Amino acid sequence: MHAADGAELFVTKTCNACHGADARTPLLPVYPKLAGQNADYLLAQMKDIKSGARNNGQTAAMKAIMVNVDETEMKTLADWLGGL
């Protein structure tokens, strides 16, 4: 996948609704800024939220979203966000 795919997934999977259009300006201060984070860390967090291994903070809202994100898409998102 290409960077454009990550940008597209960020919108189509509704990540932008909470984390901001630029992944740097979240809707609320409790939501993390994702741009520039370590891609491996982001991928691990998405996997843990989807599996339920991470179940704190805002993970209830994220778990509902992650149902519709497969592992390939998670990797594409993580790589794209890490490169911002």
Image: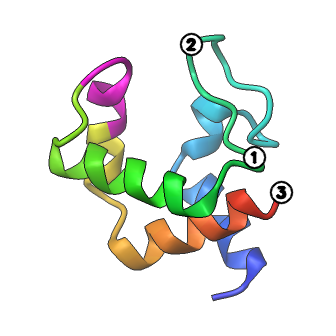
Secondary structure state at the residue bearing disc 3: loop
Q: Residue 35 carries which label?
A: 1
Placement of 36 over or under 57, stated as above or below? below
Q: Nearer the viewer, residue 23 or 43?
A: 43
Neighbor class of circle 3 (other Cα within 10 Å; few <14, some 14-19, many 20+) is: few
Distance in Å between CA atoms under marks 1 and 2: 15 Å
Query: Residue at label 3?
Result: 84
Secondary structure state at the residue bearing disc 1: loop
Q: Which residue is situated farthest in the top direction here?
A: 29
Secondary structure state at the residue bearing disc 2: loop
Quarter of the image for residue 81 reads bottom right
Residue 24, given in percent of the width and then of the height, sits at 79, 34
Tag 1: amino acid: Ala
Neighbor class of circle 1 (other Cα within 10 Å; few <14, some 14-19, many 20+) is: some
Q: Which of marks 1 and 2 is nearer the N terminus?
A: 2
Tag 2: amino acid: Val
Distance in Å between CA atoms under marks 3 and 2: 20 Å
Quarter of the image for residue 63 reads top left
Query: Residue at label 2?
Result: 30
Left or right, 75 with respect to 81, comes to left
Residue 50, given in percent of the width and then of the height, sits at 25, 50
Q: What stretch is highlighted in magenta?
A: 56-62
Q: Residue at x 28, y 21 (%)?
A: 56
Neighbor class of circle 2 (other Cα within 10 Å; few <14, some 14-19, many 20+) is: few
Q: Which residue is drawn at 67% across and 42% down?
A: 34
